[in-house]
Image (tube, grey):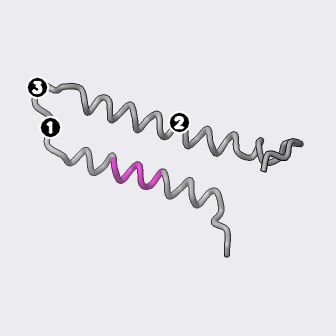
Amino acid sequence: MALIPRAAVLVMAIAAMLATLANAAQAPAPAPTSDGTSVDQGIAYVLMFVALALTYLIHPLDASSAYKLF
């Protein structure tokens, strides 16, 4: 089984997020009395992107440590 390069996975994740944002931009404008769900969803997307970036930054450090966790 061939391993997928880490850069390819990162590029695919970024492309998926950009496609989602482009799709959201085409949606009709929300009503003036918005209940804040779109703001919450935007914050959730940002937090998921930060978590993904931190995972890719921290994982090599964990994999190269002297402790054998698995």
Percent of width and height locating residue 34: 16, 26
**Amino acid type, callout 1:** Ala
Query: Which residue is label 2 attached to?
Result: 50
Marks 1/3: CA–CA distance:
9 Å
Residue 16 inside the magenta-drawn segment: yes
Please rate how many residues cluster around mark 3, counting C-alpha atoms within 10 Å: few if below 14, some from 14 to 19, many from 20: few
Write down the residue under mark 1: 29
Q: Where in the figure is residue 60, as x and y percent of width and height? A: 75, 46
Q: Is residue 40 left or right of residue 8?
A: left
Q: Residue at x 26, y 46 (%)?
A: 24
C-alpha gap between disc 2 and disc 1: 27 Å
Q: Position of residue 13 (x, y in %)?
A: 49, 53
Span shown in magenta: 14-20
In this picture, residue 41 sits left or right of residue 57: left
Q: Is residue 36 above or below residue 22?
A: above
- Position in image of residue 37 (x %, y %): 25, 31
Q: Please name the residue that numbered disc 3 is placed on.
A: 32
